[in-house]
Image: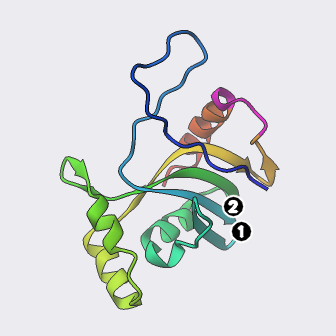
Amino acid sequence: MIAAPMEALLAAELPDGDGWQFEPKWDGFRCLARRDGAEVTLTSKSGKPLARYFPEVVEMLHRVKAKRFLLDGELIIPLGDALSFEALQMRLHPAESRVRKLAAQTPAELMAFDLLEQDGKSLADLPLSERREQLEKFMKKNAV
């Protein structure tokens, strides 16, 4: 069982000192991306399945060399020099033909920022700094 995802917090100023890590606020959908052999799932932070809406992300995850992993990240759609939350929302459409058309026109990407499981082993109890290091190694080794 994975704990609830960390959420962005609004602050008047950034904290000082060691031990802090900062991530940009991505304009996307929070997503857990799991691969277990041939099965790939994308799950929203509320637990809803997202894979049918983002077939190009599922296909990309099938091309990753590693066969078992769990990534925490954000589904995003880059358009020009910005991210389009509107294009992302349009993907939540009931018609599969429309989803496929939009996937071709405005492909989504997974911006991974945490590696929670690798090769069937949970990394969730490791400090974030160690998981980040593992994520960077994972990405270099498994680039598609």
Q: Which mark is residue 68?
A: none
Q: Could you tell me which residue is drawn at 43 percent across and 27 percent down? A: 11
Residue projecting furthest to the left: 80
Indicate the quadrant containing the N terminus: top left, top right, bottom left or bottom right. Answer: bottom right
Q: Could you tell me which residue is drawn at 36 percent across and 82 percent down? A: 100
Are the residues at dot 2 and dot 1 in contact (C-beta closer than 8 Å)? yes
Answer with mark 2 or mark 1, whichever residue precedes in sequence: 1
Q: Measuring from the top left, give residue 71's x and y in whole percent.
A: 61, 52
Q: Measuring from the top left, give residue 22's x and y in whole percent.
A: 48, 28
Q: How is the image coloured?
A: rainbow
The picture quadrant where one finds residue 127 is top right
Q: Measuring from the top left, give residue 35's x and y in whole percent.
A: 66, 64
Label 1 secondary element: loop
In depth, the one of 36 and 5 nearer the eye is 5
Residue projecting furthest to the front: 12
Q: Is residue 91 left or right of residue 82?
A: right
Q: Is residue 126 magenta?
A: yes
Q: Could you tell me which residue is drawn at 39 percent across and 41 percent down? A: 25
Q: Is residue 129 above or below residue 68?
A: above
The type of residue carrying mark 2 is Lys
Q: Which mark is residue 37?
A: 1
CA gap, disc 2 to disc 1?
A: 5 Å
Q: Residues within 10 Å of mark 1 (few under 14, many from 20)?
A: few
Q: Residues within 10 Å of mark 2 (few under 14, many from 20)?
A: some
Q: Measuring from the top left, give residue 85's x and y in whole percent.
A: 31, 59
Specify start and end residues of the magenta stretch as a single range. Answer: 125-130
Q: Is residue 97 magenta?
A: no
Q: Is residue 13 left or right of residue 84?
A: right
Q: Which mark is residue 67?
A: 2
